[in-house]
Image (cartoon, rainbow, N blue to C red):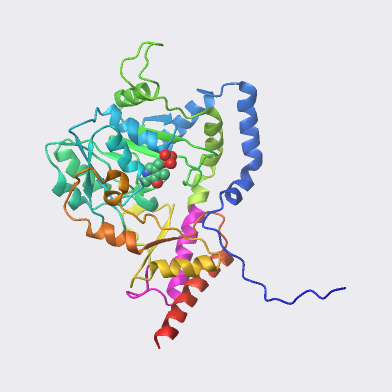
Amino acid sequence: MAQQPTTQPTPAGVPLLDVNRDNRPHREEFIEALTDVVDSGRFLFGPDVTELECEVAGYCQVDNAVGCASGSDALLLALMALNIGPGDEVIVPSFTFFASVSCITRLGATPVFADICPDTFNVDPQSIQSLISTKTKAIIPVHLFGQCAQIDSICQIAGKHDIPVIEDAAQAIGAAYHSRPAGSWGEIGCFSFYPTKNLGGMGDGGMITTRDAALADRLRLFAGHGMRPRYYHQVVGINSRLDTFQAAVLRVKLRHLSAAIDARTEVADRYDRLLQEAGVVSSEAITLPTRDANATHVWNQYAIRVDGGRRDQLRSYLSERSIGSEIYYPVPMHEQECFQDIEFRHNGLTETERASREVLNLPVFPSLTEAEQGRVVDAIASFYAAAARAAA
Ligand SMILES: *Cc1c(COP(=O)(O)O)cnc(C)c1O
């Protein structure tokens, strides 16, 4: 028999995400819930949709929640329900996902870009304040990476000028500021159930929260073709529904959400400790994510800052060792090709541009193991050890 070649076992890689591994323990619950939907035949407007709306409203401590097709639609519907259109300005961070901004331009309104705080990557309330004009019709703070922006100050500033706040809480279900949930601070909260979000479905889905029953009614009107009663269209709405299959899956996931958040928090705490112990936390190497003392972080992302212009080198090094990482976000919105014809008002986006060059997101998901985290940190440590040897 031929001798097996003796090779060193290559250390296993670490995925950025493993949605399948996270979902597997709940497989039976999903099948049961989905079977009920199959048997009911109520694929749209089934009882699970209404139940989920009530459960999410309760979870976010608001009176109303309206399901829709995605987090992107939630934001679009929010602006539609507030009558925002051409000539109106909406203040939003440039350091965010595209959907926070495309909802504005799609309605013919103009985004005005606020800069971020360098520590949390979240929008800077002072920057928002300085950008308010008579044309400002809404403010969209984004609770980036699962940590609330300084939403108390933002709501205070907005309140003084009577400007509605739309929270982009797509990454932040379960997060809180001063113990008050994300999505309950502003006039409207927008959530996404994209599979990689903290409450992730098995497809697209979204939800809108509001304390105002009349506004909830208007959001529902816009999400249903503006039609009321049937075939009579009061406004030009869109078709945006959360289907019953997604709602059934999401109700199962919601039961496990707080355990999932606890697991993510444990992962984040362990990264903080392991990276410190590895000696890579310094002004020349890595900066750990900053925790706002007033915020409850739900760790949709673990975002480090890589100093000294070495972010892309570190990412390649990790990638060569099959360790997943991602850059959220490499190109700020004001620099996107599709917006090049728009003249943006802002007051300097230095921190936004620096963050897009320095941020690096490490693997974080509830079922990530301690051993896997160890491999991520070992690889980062060996990158800096190799860099130090090369410099010596
Ligand atoms: C994911 C996300 C959205 C959009 O949600 P979809 O459900 O994918 O449409 C909007 N804003 C932010 C900040 C997001 O992360």
Q: Position of residue 48 (x, y in %)?
A: 53, 28
- Image-quadrant location for residue 213: top left
Q: Residue at image x 56%, y 38%? A: 252
Does 126 lie within the magenta span? no
Q: Is residue 210 left or right of residue 384?
A: left
Q: Nearer the viewer, residue 293 or 354?
A: 354
Does 276 lie within the magenta span? yes
- Image-quadrant location for residue 293: bottom left
Instruction: Give the farthest residue toward the right.
Output: 1
Q: Is residue 268 left or right of residue 371?
A: left
Q: Nearer the viewer, residue 307 or 119?
A: 307
Say if 183 sits above or below 363 in the image.
above
Q: Residue at image x 57%, y 61%? A: 369
Does residue 118 appear anywhere in the picture? no
Q: Position of residue 169 (x, y in %)?
A: 36, 43
Q: Residue at image x 26%, y 49%? A: 334
Which segment is the magenta one? Answer: 262-287
Say if 175 sits above or below 32 in the image.
below
Does residue 372 appear anywhere in the picture? yes
Main secondary-structure element of the magenta-colored stretch: helix
What is the tally of numbered marks visible in this picture? 0
Instruction: Give the farthest residue toward the bottom.
Output: 392
Say if 383 sits above or below 291 in the image.
below
Q: Residue at image x 17%, y 44%? A: 157
For the N terminus, the image quarter is bottom right
Say if 133 sits above or below 54 in the image.
below
- Image-quadrant location for residue 186: top left
Q: Position of residue 380 (x, y in %)?
A: 47, 72
For the C terminus, the image quarter is bottom left
- Image quadrant of ligand 1? top left
Q: Position of residue 361 (x, y in %)?
A: 43, 59
